[in-house]
C-alpha cells in the first residue's frame, strides 16, 4: 500500500496496511523512503509481537511520514502477532481483528 501510494500519488487518495513487515529498514529500497511522494491519507495497523516490524521500524515509519507531511494514523495492537487478521491461521487474534474493523 505504501509503495503504491508513493509510486502513484496522482491516483491513490487513501491506503491502508495491516500487519505489514519490513516497512522501514536500512535497505535502499525500504518502503518508508517513498514518504516524500505520498499525497494519500494512510492508515497502518501494526502488531506489537511482529518480528518483521519491530518498534524501531514503526517509529522510523511514523517519523518519515510526519516529516513528509503525510496524513496518517498508525495503531499498534497489543499482544497481536503478524497475521492477526487472518482467521484461518494460528496468528489470528479476535480482539485485534475486531478492533481494526471498528
Image: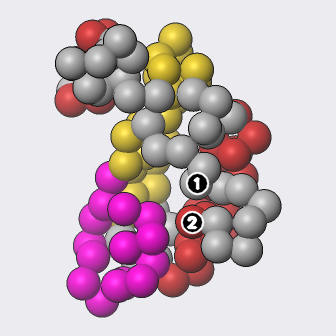
Mark 2 closeness class: few <14, some 14–19, many ≥20 residues within 10 Å: some
Question: Residue tagged by mark 1?
Answer: 23
Mark 1 closeness class: few <14, some 14–19, many ≥20 residues within 10 Å: many
Q: Is residue 15 visible?
A: yes
Dividing the picture into quadrants, the one containing residue 18 is top left
Residue 90, position as x, y percentages in the image: 35, 12
Task: In the displayed orientation, state which residue is furthest to the front.
Answer: 89
Dividing the picture into quadrants, the one containing residue 51 is top right
Q: Earlier in the sequence, mark 1 or mark 2?
A: 1
Residue 95, position as x, y percentages in the image: 31, 10
Q: Is residue 17 above or below residue 1?
A: above
Query: Of helix, strand and loop, which one carries label 1?
Result: loop
Q: Is residue 37 above or below residue 2?
A: below
Quarter of the image with the N terminus is bottom left
Residue 96, position as x, y percentages in the image: 35, 18
Residue drawn at 37 percent across, 73 percent down: 4
Query: Of helix, strand and loop, which one carries label 2?
Result: helix
Magenta span: 1-16
> Is residue 13 found left or right of 1 in the rendered image?
left
Quarter of the image with the C terminus is top left
Question: Residue tagged by mark 2?
Answer: 31
Residue closer to the observer: 76 or 69: 76
Q: Is residue 22 above or below residue 42?
A: above
Would you say the residues marked 1 and 2 are in contact, meaning their CB atoms lie under 8 Å apart? yes
Amino acid at each position: 500500500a505504501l509503495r503504491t501510494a508513493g509510486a502513484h500519488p496522482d491516483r491513490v487518495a487513501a491506503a491502508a496496511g495491516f500487519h505489514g513487515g519490513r516497512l522501514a529498514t536500512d535497505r535502499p529500497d525500504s518502503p518508508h523512503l517513498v514518504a516524500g511522494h505520498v499525497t494519500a491519507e494512510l492508515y497502518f495497523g501494526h502488531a506489537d509481537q511482529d518480528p518483521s516490524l519491530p518498534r524501531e521500524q514503526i517509529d522510523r515509519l511514523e517519523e518519515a511520514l510526519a516529516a513528509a507531511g503525510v496524513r496518517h494514523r498508525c495503531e499498534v495492537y497489543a499482544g497481536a502477532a503478524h497475521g492477526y487478521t487472518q482467521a484461518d491461521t494460528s496468528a489470528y487474534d479476535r480482539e485485534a481483528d475486531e478492533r481494526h474493523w471498528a
